[in-house]
Image: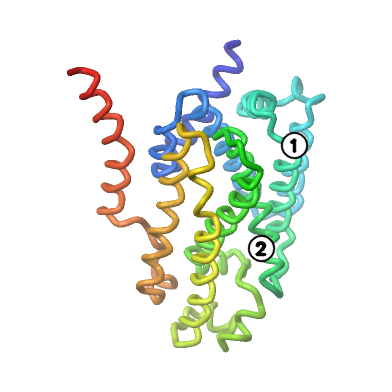
Amino acid sequence: MKPALADSYNQCEKLVKLQSTSFYLASRTLPTHKRKAIYVIYAFCRLCDDIVDNTDKPIEKKRGVDEVRFSLQPENKSTNQNSIMLAVHDVINTYEIPLLYFEDLLLGMETDIDFVKFKTFEELKLYCYRVASTVGLMCLNIFGHDNQRCKELAINLGVAMQLTNIIRDVKEDFGMNRIYLPKEDFEYSGYTYNELGNGIINANFNNLIKIQISRAEKYFAKSKPLKSLLHKDSQQCLELIAEVYIKLLNQMNKNPNLILKQRTELTFINKVHLLMKCYLPNLKKRLYVSR
């Protein structure tokens, strides 16, 4: 591997270590080559998020997305200025990941730039596909599978995970003038945008959140067979990533009122459980080999 490419991969790994402890821990269960590739996908998604969230000027956001779109094209590989893009191109080529997944992700980013409230769940579901399911499909090529049904299952998991994010960040997103929850759900529950802005917690708010949680649970259930269809060396990673989101969802389900008061995080016990799941199997293998 050339020094520039190796450095690009290293930049991606540093970003994952810095930004996401849970994701980093889960990825440690993968073989080295898959783990490095997953870091690259994470770093690319982080790059896109930062473009949309780190400036208030829509024209700069659009320019940033257009630059990423340009840099993704194979013919522009040698002109890339961003340090992670060499690794992105290498992963795309190595794992034969369709460029369409990346292009759809950028469409999702553009939704956040010119944000318009979603009227229906179908509109929200399309957004979830673009910003989350596409990432799952990218990872699917890296994890490895021998069943076409995996794509549908990965899409369902992406929707479930993004719905969980949206529920958890509903207060923070409102502060950025983004209300992802569909208008039809507000109308059905009787809760209003003004009440959300004022942080009002009542029975209607609980009904609104229960609708979202129930929906996310349904999509997690629909994605459950995915793990067993992946190559064995990738199954634990997927299980751990999904488990993080399911635990967050369960915490919010137990006490929906906290959603508008504080950001839901994994409890200390849940973090310890995740650490044990990551490292105990490897420790057992080492102990067995050393006998």
Task: Choose top left, top right, bottom left or bottom right for residue 98.
Answer: top right
The percent coordinates of residue 65 (x first, y second) are 73, 44
Give the labeled residue for mark 1: 99
Q: CA distance from mark 2 to mark 1?
A: 21 Å
Question: Is residue 82 in view from this perspective?
Answer: no
Q: Nearer the viewer, residue 82 or 224?
A: 224
Q: What is the quadrant of residue 50 in the picture?
A: top right
Packing grade of label 2 (10 A; few <14, some 14-19, many >=20) is some
Q: Nearer the viewer, residue 91 or 284?
A: 284
Residue 176 sits in which quadrant? Answer: bottom right
The picture places residue 279, in percent across and down from the top left corner, at 29, 35
Report the side of 282 relative to 214 (left or right). Answer: left
Give me the disc on residue 73.
Answer: none
Q: What residue would you read off at disc 2?
A: 125
Quadrant of the frame with the N terminus = top right
Q: Is residue 79 above or below residue 107?
A: above
Q: Please report the residue visible at 58 percent of the width from the left and 53 percent of the height from the top.
A: 158
Q: Nearer the viewer, residue 238 or 129?
A: 238
Question: Compared to 267, does 4 lie above or below?
Answer: above
Residue type pointed to by label 1: Leu
Which residue shows up at 63% across the image and 47% down it? 149
What kind of residue is marked 2? Lys
Q: Residue furthest left?
A: 291
Q: Residue at x 29, y 34 (%)?
A: 281
The quadrant of the picture occupied by the C terminus is top left
Name the residue: 59% across, 56% down. 156
Crowd tier of the residue under label 1, counting other residues whose Cα lies within 10 Å: few below 14, some 14–19, many 20 or above: some
Residue 23, given in percent of the width and then of the height, sits at: 44, 42
